[in-house]
Amino acid sequence: MKLTSKLSVLAIFALFNLTSCEKENFDEITETTSKEQENILAKACTAPGWASQNGGTSGGSGTETTVTNYSQLKAAIENSSVKVVKVTGTISIPNAGRINFQDQSAKTIYGTSGAKIVSSDQTKSGSGILNIKRCKNIIIRNIIFEGPGAYDTDGWDLAILDNCQNVWVDHCEFRDGVDGNFDIKNQSDYITVSYTKFTYLKAPKAGGPGGSDDHRYSNLIGSSDSATGDRGKLKITFARCWWASGCRERMPRVRFGQVHIVNSYFNSTASNKCVAAGKEANIRVENNAFENVKNPIDLMSGFTAVTSVGNSFSGTSGTSSGSGTAFTPPYSISLLSASSAKSTVTSGAGATLSGNICNSF
C-alpha cells in the first residue's frame, strides 16, 4: 500500500475513534443551522468551580422566550414555567421596577450580542435590577447590567443572590450599581461567577444618607458578621473575572464562605482595597494578576485563612500577603499562569458572546 493510502486509512480510523464530547458536538454542529449551533453548545456547557458540585448547574432547557421590553422581561422571569429567557436589545427598568426572581429552579436567562438591562433609579427602595431569592440551578449569561452610579442610600445592588444554590453567572458585566454591583448572601451556596466584568464608569454621587461619599463597592459576600447561618455556606468561585476601572472596594469582601478567586485581573486605579477577608472568611487567591491597585489582599479582623499562591503584583502598594492555610477546592479547574490571566480576561470577560454559548475551561 502506498504511504499516502496508509495515512488516509489511519486518519479515517482516528476520526471515527474520537470519543470526546467536543468531537460529538462538532459533528452535530456541522449539520445544523446557526441557531441550533448555539443550543448545542449551550447544552455542552459544564459549569466550572463550585457550581459544578452538589449535582452541578445546567440551567433551563426547551423553548426560548424572547423579550425586548420591560413587561416581557418581568413576565418571563417571574413565570416559573418559562425555562429559557432570551434578552434582546436594551431594556430599561422603570423606577421601582426591580424584578423579583424567586422560588424557581432550572432556568437560564441570557442575552444576544449587546443585550443590556438598565436601571436609573438611585433611591433606597427602588434601585436595583434583579432580586434572586430561593432559586436553584440557574444560569445567567452574556448580559450587561447597568445602574445609575454609586450613591450611598443603603439601596440595592444591580443583582443579589439571596439563599440560592447552584447558580452560574457567566460572561456578564455589572456596572454602576447604586449600593454595589453584585452581592451574594444568606446561605447561598455552590456559586460560580466566570468571565464577568465589574466596573464603575460613572462618577459616584456624594452625600448619600448611608454615609459614604464614594460607594463604588462592587461585591459583598455575606451580609453581616451576625449572619452566622452562613457558616458552611457561601462556597463561591470567581474565575477569570475582571475588577476594572472605578472599583474602589469589595472585589470581593468576604464573610464566612469558602471563596476561590482564580485567574482574575484587578486594575482599578481608584481602588482602596481589593480582596477583603472579613469574619471567618476562608479564601484561596490563586494565579491572579493585580496591577496598579492598592492593598490587593486586605486582612480584616476575624478571618479564618487566606492562601495567596501564584499571583503577580505590578505597580501595587499596601498589603498583598495571605495568612494561614485556606481550603482546598474539591473540584479541578484549568489554571492559567498569572502572567496569562490579564490577556485572557481582558479579551474575554464581560458580555462578549453572541448568545447562549460557553467557553471551556
Image (cartoon, rainbow, N blue to C red):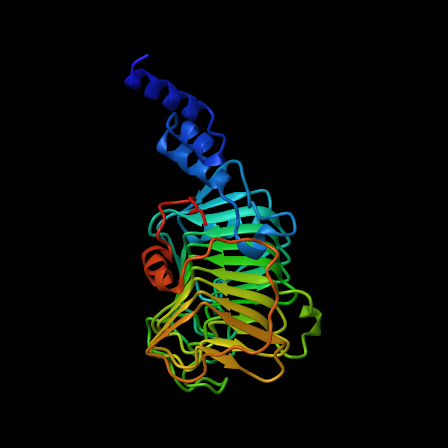
Residue at point 58%, 79% (across, down): 278
Q: Please tell me whether residue 216 is drawn above or below residue 112 in the rendered image.
A: below
**Quarter of the figure with residue 230:** bottom right
Left or right of residue 207: residue 50: right
**Quarter of the figure with residue 232:** bottom right
Query: Where in the figure is residue 56, as x and y percent of width and height?
Result: 60, 48
- For the image, the number of numbered tags is 0
Left or right of residue 47: residue 163: right
Query: Where in the figure is residue 356, as x and y percent of width and height?
Result: 43, 44
Does residue 229 show up? yes
**Quarter of the figure with residue 185:** bottom right
Query: Where in the figure is residue 53, as x and y percent of width and height?
Result: 62, 52
Which image quadrant: the N terminus?
top left
Residues 111 and 250: in front is 250
Q: Please tell me whether residue 73 is drawn above or below residue 251 in the rendered image.
A: above
Query: Where in the figure is residue 267, as x and y percent of width and height?
Result: 35, 72
Residues 70 and 330: in front is 330
Q: Name the residue at the top extreme.
A: 1
Residues 320 and 230: in front is 320
Q: Name the residue at the right extreme.
A: 229
Left or right of residue 273: residue 354: left
Q: Please tell me whether residue 203 is drawn above or below residue 131 in the rendered image.
A: below
